[in-house]
Each structure stands twice: as C-alpha cells, then as structure tokens.
C-alpha cells in the first residue's frame, strides 16, 4: 500500500475540497493518506506555504498541488 502525505491547513477550503476529491477518486482506493499542517515544519512552510494543498509521495515528491487534478492522481497510482 502506498502512503501519501497531504499538506494543508485547518480551515482551508481548497484543502478540504482536494481531500474530498482525493478520497473519492478510484485510483486512491488502495492509498494510505496521512495529513500534516504545512506550518509544522519550517521547510514545508517555506517551500509549500502558499501552494497548499500539496500531495507528496513516499519520496517527498509533489504529486499534485493547488487543485485536484484527476489525471495526475491516476498517473501517480500506476
């Protein structure tokens, strides 16, 4: 099972919409999705603070950011 990290902030409407779309996309059925606040680490805040939501793969590579892109999510599951 692949593990992905979703970076966002509490009260972020875009983050909530992104997560909802992520959880209902068929390609993510076998994914484990962890959550973290982008402000928890200075490096995340500096790199991604204005780009949330950001979905990272197990290597820390950006899978998607800002808006939900079903094509990128599907490609990441392959």
Image (cartoon, rainbow, N blue to C red):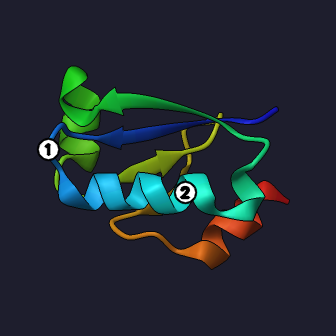
Task: Tell me the quarter of the image containing the C terminus.
Answer: bottom right
Query: Residue 62: x percent and y percent?
Result: 51, 53
Query: Residue 16: x percent and y percent?
Result: 31, 52
Sequence order check: which comes first, mark 2 or mark 1? 1
Query: Element at badge 1?
Result: loop
Q: Which mark is residue 11?
A: 1
The alpha-carbon separation of the residues under discs 2 and 1 comes to: 17 Å
Q: Residue at x 63, y 71 (%)?
A: 72
Q: Which mark is residue 28?
A: none
Q: Give 75 or 48, whichever is nearer the viewer.
A: 75
Q: Is residue 5 left or right of residue 27?
A: left
Q: Is residue 54 left or right of residue 43?
A: right
Would you identify the image quadrant in which residue 27 lies?
bottom right
- Give the residue furthest to the top: 40
Q: Which residue is mark 2?
A: 22
Would you identify the image quadrant in which residue 63 lies?
bottom right
């Amino acid at each position: 099972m692949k593990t992905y990290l979703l970076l966002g902030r509490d009260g972020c409407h875009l983050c909530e919409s992104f997560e909802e779309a992520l959880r209902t996309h068929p390609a993510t059925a076998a994914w484990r999705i962890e959550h973290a606040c982008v402000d928890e680490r200075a490096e995340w805040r500096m790199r991604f603070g204005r780009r949330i939501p950001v979905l990272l793969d197990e290597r820390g590579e950006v899978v998607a950011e800002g808006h939900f892109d079903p094509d990128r999510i599907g490609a990441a599951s392959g």
